[in-house]
């Protein structure tokens, strides 16, 4: 977590703004994925005239509010060697011969929003450094602003803020009869933790987001909160947001929830529990996926002075107890580690091309589970060298990548990058235990199958895994238009197809603003074409 080398690169002043082109592309992506996926949209069910107005009002606020990140907060700036077509909102990634160099990673999305929330609940002021500059973090910051949690910005450094904690739960700044309406876009790392934390204070809240957020399940979290006595609901027919909260504090208690769908539900309950009045015990009743993210949460809570008691095996059905005396105390300052999920693109690019890339900001001492993606690349044939805060990857030109069969349940985000690396391997690659793909920013299983198929692969799709057979002789199709479905990781992952020596056309490249606005600049900075 304490990574002194992790710093965001300066933005290229010659880069191209894409925000104005996004609206038509998002609509197109939604239509295309709807055609590819046989799941019915929950948006029409979830909508009511009142909540639709909330979305309209808050979207207007989100568009006009510049917040911490200044005028370019929701804009991706790009300067690739090939031109951006502004008429179609596409970016052509030119054929990449090799990736070589050192990349300093932006801050972790998961850690950034967790740090902001814990700082807001703590006693004292917390300086948060290397904060990720992205849409998801902006939504959390805007929510804290709206709830009158003091957040001091540093001029000319959008990656640093100082949060004055509430020394307990966050209460609504409005009167008893008014509802505080929060628009959180498609930021799961804001929606889920805030839904839990706001139940611990007092006031009326409605948490909503974009149409895709209204399709992302939250019922397991709501169930756990209700077991603890919270007056909180989501849309009954879908189990998705909007979330309505009538908060009057919580005494504590016990809750048993499912961990099969997302570890964020457990993490959200854990982070909120220290501001309940009494002891809280949370148990997993089936299985816990993405356990490293829960360990990350518990480790960060410890940085803020709270110790979580764990009973049982994290790979089984563990239970967690937070005694009433455990309260958050500011660590005064905290440095956000570089994003390990974002590291996967550069790690895979080096493995694919045989170049040598060092990613700085996470390494052998990382608290993030996604660093394990480097081990998967090593299984495929890459050479990996670890340092405490960096990872270096290369591949002997005489060693070909080979297909692997991997359980990716603990690294579902990085597993997307494996899907593209599989195009360059000898033999099929099986990516297992990734049902959570279907619940993310888009229906990622369908999206990955569709785009890999376009590139020439044959893909077998199953409920929670897929098998990718690479194109014949690993010859990837040229000039393929990659639909990104308003999913940042689809854009970044499939840009690596250009390592086959082909042009790759990325639709709506601005969607990377969700977590990595400077991605295409950074990729181009180490690419030889």
Image (spheres, rainbow, N blue to C red):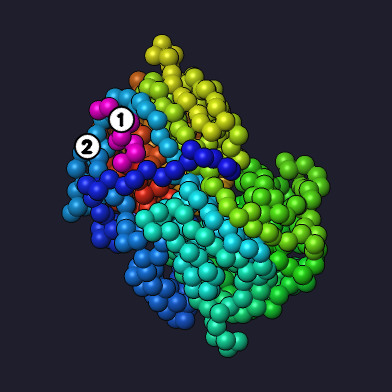
For residue 478, what is the image quadrant?
A: top left
Q: Position of residue 349 (x, y in %)?
A: 39, 29
Q: Quadrant of the C terminus?
A: top left
Q: Position of residue 293 (x, y in %)?
A: 62, 46
For residue 62, what is the image quadrant?
A: bottom left
Q: How far, Cα to Cα, is label 1 from label 2? A: 10 Å
Q: Start and end of the magenta stretch?
A: 521-529
- Disc 2 is placed on an element classified as loop
Task: State left or right for residue 251 relative to residue 485.
Answer: right
User: Residue 147 versus residue 213: which sits nearer the camera?
Assistant: 147
Please tell me how crowded label 1 is: few (under 14), some (14-19), or many (20+) other residues with Cα within 10 Å. some
Asked if one can make out residue 164 in the rendered structure from this viewpoint, the answer is yes
Residue 527 badge: 1
Q: Are marks 1 and 2 in contact (CB under 8 Å)?
A: yes
Q: Residue furthest bottom?
A: 177
Q: Residue at x 22, y 47 (%)?
A: 14
Residue 193 badge: none
Asked if one can make out residue 476 in the rendered structure from this viewpoint, the answer is no
Which residue carries the number 2 mark?
A: 81
């Amino acid at each position: 977590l304490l990574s002194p080398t992790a710093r965001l690169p300066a933005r290229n002043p010659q880069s191209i703004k894409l925000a104005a082109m996004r609206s038509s592309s998002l609509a197109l992506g939604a239509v295309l994925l709807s055609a590819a996926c046989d799941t019915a949209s929950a948006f029409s069910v979830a909508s009511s005239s009142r909540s639709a107005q909330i979305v309209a009002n808050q979207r207007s606020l989100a568009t006009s509010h510049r917040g911490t990140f200044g005028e370019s907060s929701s804009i991706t700036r790009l300067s690739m060697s090939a031109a951006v077509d502004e008429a179609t909102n596409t970016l052509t990634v030119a054929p990449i011969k090799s990736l070589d160099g050192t990349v300093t990673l932006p801050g972790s999305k998961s850690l950034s929003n967790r740090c902001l929330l814990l700082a807001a609940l703590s006693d004292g002021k917390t300086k948060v450094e290397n904060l990720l500059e992205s849409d998801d973090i902006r939504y959390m910051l805007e929510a804290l602003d709206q709830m009158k949690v003091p957040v001091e910005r540093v001029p000319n450094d959008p990656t640093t803020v100082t949060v004055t904690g509430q020394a307990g739960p966050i209460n609504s700044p409005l009167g008893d009869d008014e509802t505080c309406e929060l628009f959180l876009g498609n930021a799961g790392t804001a929606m889920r933790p805030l839904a839990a934390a706001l139940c611990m204070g007092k006031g009326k809240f409605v948490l909503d987001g974009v149409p895709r957020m209204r399709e992302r399940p939250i019922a397991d979290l709501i169930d756990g909160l209700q077991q603890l006595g919270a007056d909180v609901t989501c849309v009954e027919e879908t189990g998705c947001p909007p979330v309505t909260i009538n908060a009057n504090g919580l005494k504590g208690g016990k809750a048993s929830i499912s961990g099969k769908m997302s570890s964020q539900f457990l993490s959200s309950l854990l982070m909120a529990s220290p501001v309940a009045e009494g002891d809280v015990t949370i148990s997993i009743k089936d299985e816990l996926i993405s356990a490293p993210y829960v360990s990350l949460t518990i480790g960060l809570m410890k940085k803020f002075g709270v110790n979580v008691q764990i009973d049982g095996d994290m790979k089984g059905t563990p239970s967690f107890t937070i005694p009433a005396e455990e309260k958050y105390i500011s660590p005064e300052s905290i440095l956000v580690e570089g994003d390990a999920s974002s590291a996967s693109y550069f790690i895979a690019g080096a493995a694919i091309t045989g170049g040598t890339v060092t990613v700085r900001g996470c390494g052998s001492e990382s608290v993030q589970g996604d660093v394990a993606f480097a081990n998967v690349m090593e299984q495929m044939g890459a050479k990996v060298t670890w340092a405490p805060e960096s990872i270096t990857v290369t591949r002997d030109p005489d060693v070909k990548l080979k297909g692997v069969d991997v359980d990716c349940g603990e690294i579902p985000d990085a597993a997307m990058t494996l899907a593209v690396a599989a195009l360059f391997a000898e033999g099929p690659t099986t990516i297992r235990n990734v049902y959570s793909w279907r619940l993310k920013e888009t229906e990622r299983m369908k999206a990955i199958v569709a785009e890999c198929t376009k590139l020439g692969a044959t893909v077998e799709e199953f409920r929670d895994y897929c098998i990718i057979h690479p194109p014949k002789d690993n010859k990837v199709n040229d000039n393929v238009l990659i639909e990104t479905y308003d999913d940042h990781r689809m854009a970044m992952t499939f840009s690596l197809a250009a390592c086959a020596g082909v042009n790759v056309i990325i639709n709506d490249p601005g969607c990377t603003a969700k977590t990595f606005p400077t991605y295409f600049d950074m990729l181009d900075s180490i690419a030889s074409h």
